């Protein structure tokens, strides 16, 4: 998994988005059964499976900030799989949203 966590930083009103690549090793195949956020009220996420035949087999998790006021938040995205070796994958999300210069005046 790269990177190991999601960090979203920027000004209010800017689109803040980050993507994690989750590889699926041939020796340990798995399928994602469910994706959920612990809280989820300040973010939106989408999991996309890599197209067959690509160099990297697995998934891309795209996380987008939805908070429209200055402040910080933390959340945790949990991916449930059918793998016996790693049935859950947890991805921490940390966000810091700053007031825009226009808001400060």
Image (tube, rainbow, N blue to C red):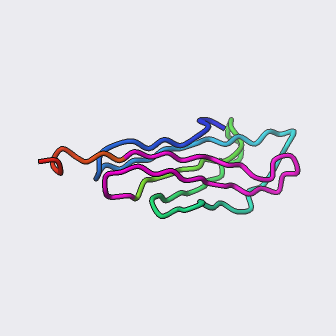
Residue situated in front as seen by the camera: 31 or 3: 3
The quarter of the rendered structure image containing the N terminus is top right
Q: Magenta residues? A: 67-96
On the rendered structure, is 57 left or right of 75?
right
Give the residue displayed 70% in from the left and 45% down from the top: 58
Query: Secondary structure of the magenta portion, mostly?
Result: strand
Name the residue located 75 percent from the left edge and 42 percent from the top edge.
24
Asked whether residue 79 is drawn in magenta, I would say yes
Where is residue 31? Give x, y as percent. Answer: 77, 55
Work out whether 20 lies above or below 48.
above
Quadrant of residue 96 within the rendered picture: top left
In percent of the image, x 67 and y 40: which residue is there?
54
Residue 64, placed above or below residue 40: above
Q: Is residue 94 above or below residue 81?
A: above
Q: Is residue 53 left or right of residue 14?
A: right
**What is the total number of numbered labels drawn onto the structure image?**
0
Q: Quadrant of residue 77?
A: bottom right
Q: Quadrant of residue 34?
A: bottom right
Instruction: Farthest residue to the left: give it.
Output: 105
28 sits to left or right of 34: right
Picture coordinates of residue 2, whole percent (x, y):
62, 35
Q: Nearer the viewer, residue 26 or 89?
A: 89
- Residue 98 among those drawn in magenta: no
Q: Position of residue 85 (x, y in %)?
A: 86, 46
11 vs 46, nearest the viewer: 11
Residue 74 position in % (x across, y down): 51, 50
Q: Is residue 53 left or right of residue 29?
A: left
């Amino acid at each position: 998994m790269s990177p190991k966590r999601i960090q979203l930083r920027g000004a209010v009103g800017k689109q803040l988005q980050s993507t994690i690549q989750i590889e699926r090793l041939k020796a340990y195949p798995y399928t994602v059964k469910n994706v959920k956020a612990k809280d989820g009220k300040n973010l939106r996420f989408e999991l996309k499976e890599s197209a067959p035949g690509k160099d990297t087999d697995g998934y891309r998790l795209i996380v987008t900030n939805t908070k429209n006021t200055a402040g910080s938040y933390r959340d945790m995205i949990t991916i449930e799989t059918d793998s016996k070796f790693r049935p859950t994958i947890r991805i921490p999300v940390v966000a810091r949203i700053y007031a825009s210069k226009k808001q400060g005046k």
